[in-house]
């Protein structure tokens, strides 16, 4: 008997969550959406993901209520993908995974995250040490770090060379 793709014998809620975000690329799509990426071509260029995989992940995340599809242009019809509240709640997961990866595997600092209100760099769990509060993504300023390519080819990477708030739409020069 072939092994199933899901974790049907697992009752753990981690297993349930991994059915949504455990596939390759999925959390990176969520990460980009937290950075403010909304449009298909922007995800495509920034992630370097195969087209079919991106289309499948966007559809699945939309069906699962992590992303919401919004029409931003009628002719030709174009949709963008915006995180729902359920999707925004994945921020601490993305934050913790990034920190864990940097601690143990890759020390390169690509981005720093600060509380917009006071300018303090976030602590390991996404909290502001100065305000002693957990900072919601909309109040987090993302700052380019020393490890970033200063002259990237793709438009999203270029747009992210400037500090910006999480969730605020990325504005690129491509259509
Ligand atoms: Zn603060």
Image (cartoon, rainbow, N blue to C red):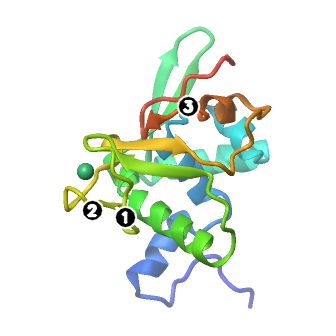
The residue that disc 2 covers is: 129
Residue at image location 45% in from the left, 28% down from the top: 70
Q: In which image quadrant can residue 131 be found?
A: bottom left
Q: Is residue 84 left or right of residue 174?
A: left
Q: Residue furthest top?
A: 75
Distance, label 2 to label 1, CA atoms, is 6 Å
Query: Label for residue 162?
Result: 3
Q: Residues within 10 Å of mark 2 (few under 14, many from 20)?
A: some
Would the CB of label 1 be found within 8 Å of ligand 1?
no
Which of the two residues, 27 or 138, is positioned nearer the viewer here?
Answer: 138
Query: Label for residue 32?
Result: none
Q: Earlier in the sequence, mark 2 or mark 1?
A: 1
The residue that disc 1 covers is: 123
| Rendered location of residue 29, percent (x, y) | 59, 50
| Rendered location of residue 7, percent (x, y) | 54, 82
* Quadrant (top left, top right, bottom left, bottom right) of the C terminus: top right
Q: Is residue 82 left or right of residue 55?
A: left
Would the CB of label 2 be found within 8 Å of ligand 1?
yes
Q: Would you place residue 3 above or below residue 44 in this image?
A: below
Disc 1 secondary structure class: loop
Q: Is residue 79 left or right of residue 153?
A: left
Disc 3 secondary structure class: loop
Distance, label 2 to label 3, CA atoms, is 24 Å
Disc 2 secondary structure class: loop
């Amino acid at each position: 008997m072939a092994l199933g793709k899901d974790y049907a014998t697992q009752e753990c809620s981690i297993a349930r969550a991994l059915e949504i975000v455990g596939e390759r690329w999925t959390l990176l799509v969520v990460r980009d959406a937290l950075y403010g990426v909304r449009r298909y071509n922007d995800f495509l260029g920034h992630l370097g993901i195969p087209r079919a995989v991106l289309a499948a992940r966007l559809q699945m995340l939309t069906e699962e209520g992590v992303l919401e599809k919004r029409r931003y242009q009628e002719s030709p019809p174009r949709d963008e993908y915006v995180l729902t509240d359920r999707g925004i709640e994945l921020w601490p997961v993305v934050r913790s995974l990034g920190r864990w990866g940097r601690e143990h595997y890759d020390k390169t600092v690509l981005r720093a995250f600060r509380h917009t209100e006071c300018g303090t760099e976030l602590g390991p769990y996404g909290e502001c040490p100065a305000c002693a509060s957990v900072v919601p993504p909309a109040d987090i300023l993302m700052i380019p770090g020393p490890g970033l390519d200063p002259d990237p080819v793709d438009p999203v990477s270029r747009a992210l060379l400037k500090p910006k708030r999480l969730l605020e739409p990325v504005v690129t020069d491509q259509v």
